[in-house]
Image: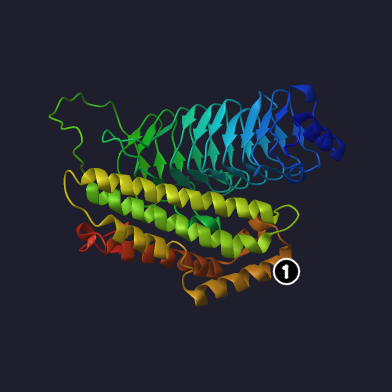
Amino acid sequence: MAVKNTDIKKVLIKKGVCFPAPESVEIGPEVNPERISANHVVVHAGCRIFGEKTLIHDGACLGHEAPATIENCYIGPKVRLNGGYFAGSVFLENVRFGSCAHVREGSILEENASAAHAVGLKQTILFPHVTLGSLINFCDCLMSGGTGSKDHSEVGSAYIHFNFTPQQDKATPSLIGDVPSGVMLNQPPIFLGGQGGLVGPARLGFGVTIAAGSICRSDELRPNRLIFSGPQKQGNIPYTPGVYRNVKRTLINNLIYIGNLAALMQWYRQVRSCFVSDLFPLALLEGLCSTLRLAIDERIKRLKGFIERCEAQERLCEWPELEGVICSYRDDEGDSQLRDAFLDAVFTGIRTWGRDYLRVIRGLDVRQKSTGTLWLQKIVDQLVEKAGQAVPLLNNTKIQKGIEE
């Protein structure tokens, strides 16, 4: 039997949740009060909370600047979602979001990531400390890089990740940094200057800076590069709608992106799971894994759509065969010796510093981090290699460490 909205609020108020204007807050009958913490959680006027999966942890603050709608989100400790719409996403400790947000399914913001006002995300993954300015549309991408709060990757205001093509497909995920090195929190930050854009699918290496006002349309895997563009020349050239160019690059970038998500899944399952505690409960870990699983499904779906649309132009592969290969390697745990050696180092760090995720990972030495990166990179490379063998166009392409040679 569904619980009345007023009854849920009464339960939460009795637990200690703060509602400055409880009569203005709407809570769906499917919401489980046991998944909402009693410790210093504040829900401001006009907020709406829906979804049986919704989890709200200690110190979370909702709707401080404007009403916030929460639907099936996993909200970690001390998260501030100051206004807007948030659905099907995960926010780890100390994430900050300004008002007028629009965050949709498949998004994960790790510790201390933040965004100012009027930011739209979907299928977006931000590693710790990544910072977004205002008036940004940043869907279908993963961004890592940086070492901490004073050395972080950042996206300037009025930036857009272009994730929809004239051929009407979304096989356009962009990898800004990567997973195997990015999770180690020891890479140079990446900066995407304001009032600019990145055309997906693209890959950018660590230390890359795109100057303000520039549109980046290509990959740049060399570290520590500055990309800038001047006034665009006018042009008027023949164009055939529906005809794909750079098909090979699109396929490679999509496979590498999926491979990186597969590596991140193993990081969550094998490494993040070691840090389950009062501040990082099992329910939050489960939210990370289930959201990432949906993100991988989304990328496979979009790749299928791209290949089907290409069939009018050329036959790229047998999709069931390629899908089977991807699905058979998406949960691969990688080299067990490398994994176990890295986990031993993590356990040693936990014994020294406790279950403080950021401190333990930062405290690993260069050799230990290299071992972990190699473990994760092999997961990426194996999926890309095996999937590439199912696509004749890629059979003669040598891909190592996610870089086409």
Q: Is residue 295 left or right of residue 99?
A: left
Residue 240: percent from left, percent from top:
15, 32
Residue where numbered disc 1 is placed: 351
Residue 163: percent from left, percent from top:
37, 37
Residue 375: percent from left, percent from top:
48, 68
Q: Quadrant of the rendered structure where residue 368 is?
A: bottom right
Question: In this view, which residue lies farthest toward the left?
Answer: 238
Residue 317: percent from left, percent from top:
23, 56
Q: Is residue 357 left or right of residue 377?
A: right
Q: Which residue occupies the foreground of this view, 88 or 396?
A: 88
Residue at 72 percent of width and 69 percent of height: 351
The count of marks equals 1
Question: In this view, which residue lies farthest toward the bottom?
Answer: 337
Amino acid type shown at disc 1 = Arg
Q: Is residue 114 left or right of residue 211?
A: right
Residue 219 makes an appearance in the image: no
Residue at 38 percent of width and 48 percent of height: 301
Q: Is residue 186 left or right of residue 64?
A: left
Residue at 34 percent of width and 44 percent of height: 171
> What secondary structure is found at the residue carrying circle 1?
helix
Tell me which colouring the rendered structure shows: rainbow
Asked if 322 appears above or below 163 in the picture, the reply is below
